[in-house]
Amino acid sequence: MRITNNMLVMNMMRNLNNNLRRLDKYQNQLSTGKLVQMPSDDPVRASRALKLRTDLNKLEQYDKNVTNALSWIEVTESAISNVEDVLQRARELTVRAANDSLSTEDKQKVADEMKQLKEHLISLGNTNYAGRYIFSGYETDKKLFTEDGKFNIDITSSALANRPETTYEIGVGEDIEVSTNGIDVFGYEEIHPTLSKLPYGYDTGIAESTSSSAEEAVIKGDELLMDADIQSDTFENTEFLINYNGVNKRISIGTLSSATVNGFVTELQTKIDAEFGAGKISVTAEDNDMDGTDYAIKFSTVNSSNIKPVLSVDIVRAKESTLIKDFEEAINAMNTGDSEGIQEFLDDIDSHINRILSVRSDIGARVNRLELVQNRIDENNVTFTKLLSENEDADLAEVIMKLKNNENVYRASLSTGAKVIQPTLIDFIR
């Protein structure tokens, strides 16, 4: 085989580049401290590094979530502690007011401080953390109470029974509820609306249409009668539970008074049409007395396809805080010198304090859990960081040794190449 000068040059350049490539590899490892610069250097090691970095980023976010959750709960615990202090002070004042030796004027002075305590309770119910109201469940953009101490959020029906709370993710598939529902702290009470025939909570039963024509849905043989001369706020936040062919829908309505019956029915009809489809359920209001003081809200079902529609109607009423309500009754009793009413508040306030203690116990359990989770995150963070270091960090002593060896090899190859191949002008002329 004939070895040409061109072959010598090409082989020398290829070997020089290989040596230079190895030298560059160790120079990069030394400057970055990492074994892998590109996935092609070691696909398995690079894939493992990406997975470990993802896990570390998750742990970092979980740690932030735990910190935020602890801050939220600390604010909540502080607010509830203040509620308990208010109740203890209210108890002291009530014991003083229950003394029969006090005059009505003296009891009125006690009532003045009780008013301030009630206002402070409303303020505590609207406590917020970072612009989010802590006692409003998932509706953190809304205050728990209005200025007059009424609930400002939806706590009717199923919203009360299964109310979502504010949660933080603190692990894979692991969430923790940090918000404490205001109804658990301040209590709630059902307000019975004025019904002429059906009492609140009465099982209105099921009516079935037996023909293809429009039929009135009989509700236990009675129309749903409402006194139209009641105060306009009596039916504020009234909610109708409509069940049509097994489908439940809760329709919330504003107010009902003698001046707004037609508007009330129109609003109810519009919302029912939106939920079930226009024309499936018909709502009407009719006078039942000559003087026009009573109205029957009648529901009818329409069947156009030989399917017997089933309709049931129930009323769900808004609720209010028992704690605020009891304070208001105690204040009225003190202003009027009603000793019996004052004594009733003494009995009620103990139950409120017990409820607060139960809520604080639950908060303490959540704090303990968060602290355990935080310790676990710290331990996992150390473990994953160690694994990441073992996977991708270079052994600097070894890298320096290999770098010097490859540097010597490269220098030697340059020197050898310069001596073996010494082209002259005659080589180019040929």
Image (tube, rainbow, N blue to C red):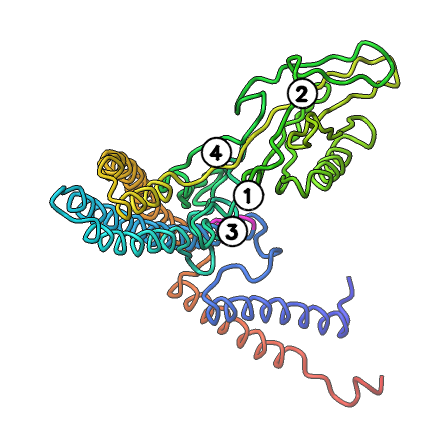
The kind of residue on which mark 2 rests is: Glu
> Label 2: which residue?
223
Please name which of the two marks, 4 or 2, marks the residue nearer to the observer: 2
Which residue reaches farthest left?
Answer: 101
Q: Give the answer, above or below, for where 51 lies relative to 116.
A: above
Q: For the view shown, which residue lies furthest in the front direction?
A: 291
Q: Residue at horizontal 55%, vertical 19%?
A: 202
Look at the numbered disc 3 and give the secondary structure of its residue: helix
Find out whether residue 294 is within the magenta segment.
Answer: no
Count neighbours of disc 1 (C-alpha within 10 A) and say few if under 14, some if 14 to 19, many if 20 or more: few
Query: How many angstroms separate mark 1 from mark 2 (CA)?
Result: 22 Å
How far, Cα to Cα, is label 3 from label 2? 63 Å
Q: Quadrant of the C terminus?
A: bottom right
Disc ID at residue 191: 4
Amino acid on which the number 3 mark rests in the picture: Thr
Q: Tell me the mark number nearer the camera, choosing from 4 and 3.
A: 4
Question: What is the magenta range?
Answer: 47-56
